[in-house]
Image (tube, helix red, strand yellow):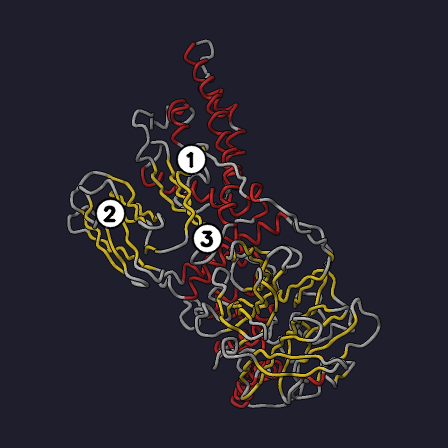
Amino acid sequence: MSRFYLIGLVLLPFISLGQIKLKDALQYGDKQFQKGDFYYALDYYQQALALDPENIDLIWKIAETNRIYKDYKQAEKYYSLVYMKDEDAERYPEAILYYALMQKQNGKYKEALDHFKLAKKIYSEDKQGYPYKKAAQEVESTNWALKQQKNGPDIAIDVQALPENINSYDAEFAHTIRKGQLYFSSLKADSINEELQEVYSPSYHTALYEISFPSTDQKARKLQSLIPTNKSIANASFLNEYDFYYSVCSDQDYRYTCGIVFGKRDSLGQWKMLDSLNEMVNFPGFNSSMPHFSKLGDQKVLFFSSNRTGTKGEMDIWYAVLDDNGQATRVENVSSINSIENDICPWFDTVENRLYFSSSWHQGFGGQDVFYSEYRNGKFGAPVNIGLPLNSPAADQYYFQSGDSTFVSSNRLGSLYSKNPTCCSDIYMAEIPRRRPIKTTIKETNTVEIVKLPIRLYFENDQPDANTTSDFTNLSYTDSYQKYAQQFPVYESKVGLQRDSIQAKKSVLELSQFFKDEVEKGRNDLELFTNQVWFELQKGNRVQLMVQGFASPLAKTDYNVHLTKRRIQSLKNYFEEVQQGRFGAYMLGDHPTLEFIEVPMGEYRANKEISDDYYDQKNSVYSKAASLERRIEIIELRSISGSFSVSRTEIQFSRPTLSDQFSLTLRNETNERIELSLDCALTNQVAFPSSLKIEANQVVTIPLRLLQKEKNFSDVLTIKNQATKEFQVIKISLQ
């Protein structure tokens, strides 16, 4: 286990090594790297680099060491050198990804976004591989961070580091307050050069400390009696005044092994380690740490992080249901928040029913952000970023609250350090008035205005983002609506050129009614609809929104398909930013709980009588008839629990031969057999089964074969779970 999970890194004394051979410097550097002594390793690697400055393998080692050492600035510098020297990305294809990650952790979001996009393109041949998934995730995440940075913090709060009788030049983390005492973990050394702030001891460990809080000028006291020989302890979480859980980690052969133990303070105030928990928590051969005791309803539970069997990523958040003796009776994975990376530092707020945790995935500002998940009706909702300024571009962990005080550990700029400004975390505090619990009745909870579907949202001609074949836009529907509404005088003037004619007056009146009864109504309906979507998400359900996109006949067929995809994307952008971005976290990951089923129809269903003459813009652009075609429609909301997935969302027969065939993969993600129905109007053009049964956790591949050649066709294949009514939609077309 990396030292990262304990606290961070150990600063060791600088040693002048004098003249050294290249081979020896590399050997010594590699040895120190394996030991976890990254400061030493960097010193040897730098000496080697002075002897061989063009060695790309050595530059890569320095970049990697700085990243693990959490020197983001230096890591960015050396990854950039690897990236520039390895132009074809053949030797170190990961360099571009890590370069972008370091830029992001240095707060350079625009530069990072460009490199994430490039990385996504480079890794696109293996879309199931981690590099592609990470790059794709970071494109979304960095776009989100840029928006949040532009909007500024949701609340104006002052985040301050705790004083130096608590924080030190080493790492402080994993804190809680009990009975006026602050308990925290630290790598404080017993022997320090006060001038250089360097540790003399070659080996030392994390320990638990306590200090009165709000603290005076007193010195924090180490809980010496809890510390086993040559082991680190951290993460105290109290059941009551006397009983508590904490982590114990051993470092054998430079590999950390962590488990959770049960401790007690006796009537004389002496601390004692009792024993470890049973194997339900401390799963043999794996790490379990960061315990947090709390309650879920009437159940006593212990949240913790572990890489045990069943973990989705590197470390997952789990919880154990406890009996009256504090032992686990069963263990559950909090699957709705866990990712393919690290999800750690759980803390549950029983007032707001929120599980707070830190993650390097999801939409965030940097290395690790703090998120929360709403606990409703026995389910944990999708992660929500707590925002600025509690989060930063660095690693933000160990969130907890005490009264109106909020705490977080962070290695952000401004933390105490000796040589690396982002090496080590300090404990930070902000005063944020707690939301008091509000009693709500069932009637109030269930009160949500139901909007009649479909909701039709209209767009200006060729918008958003004219003259491009891209499927993506950064603009939201709000942007498009505002620009479109401002264009009404232009539209009015174009259709009313002959104002004295009855037809011109009729056209102006129709257009005016269209903007009021259709354009504005769509916007208002959407605002109400978001409350309906939020209501379903808070019930712990997965929500699918089926959205169709349409275009007028103006422009080429293929261009209009891309245009309708951008219009649907603008709706997704709207959900990401509306209501302070609370939907964004539900749209993340491989299995989002707010999902958009996209059906970009282009001009296929447009009124054939509408002009497509560019030189007749009065009718092809500005008329009510043409305006009605430029829209997207939310046609269905489905609130479900997930059951199956499909391998693709669009199939296009581009070469109209009867031998054309595509395969479609369907995966049953449940532990029960499911029965699917397949429905489409194209049964004369495309062959596929009408129904299908898939056994639990099985994958089935079905062929879709072209039966007839027609000039053009486009429709959707709807695959529906007969039991839950969950559906997936695949667009099928021939051009």
Which residue type carries mark 2? Answer: Ser
Q: Quick one: label 2 or label 3, which is nearer the N terminus?
A: 3
Which residue type carries mark 1? Answer: Leu
**Image location of residue 463, percent across then percent down:** 45, 36
Q: Nearer the viewer, residue 458 or 639?
A: 639
Q: Is residue 80 visible?
A: no
Q: Residue at x 69, y 88 (%)?
A: 201
Which residue type carries mark 3? Answer: Thr
Label ID, residue 654: 2
Q: Which residue is mark 1?
A: 453
Q: Is residue 171 above or below residue 559?
A: below
User: Tag 1's secondary structure?
Assistant: loop
Q: Residue at x 35, y 55 (%)?
A: 645
Q: Which residue is mark 3?
A: 593
**Image location of residue 405, percent across then percent down:** 73, 60
Q: Quick one: label 1 or label 2, which is nearer the N terminus?
A: 1
Label ID, residue 483: none
Name the side, left or right, on which 220 lies relative to 695: right
User: Tag 2's secondary structure?
Assistant: loop
Counting other residues with Cα less than 10 Å from the Cα at mark 2, is it few (<14), some (14-19), or many (20 or more)? few
Q: CA distance from mark 1 to mark 2?
A: 33 Å
Q: Nearer the viewer, residue 735 or 319?
A: 319
**Image location of residue 516, percent across then percent down:** 50, 25
User: Tag 3's secondary structure?
Assistant: loop
Q: Residue at x 50, y 49 (%)?
A: 537
Q: CA distance from mark 3 to mark 1?
A: 21 Å
Query: What is the total number of numbered labels drawn onto the structure image?
Result: 3
**Image location of residue 232, percent across then percent down:** 63, 82
Name the side, left or right, on which 410 lies relative to 533: right
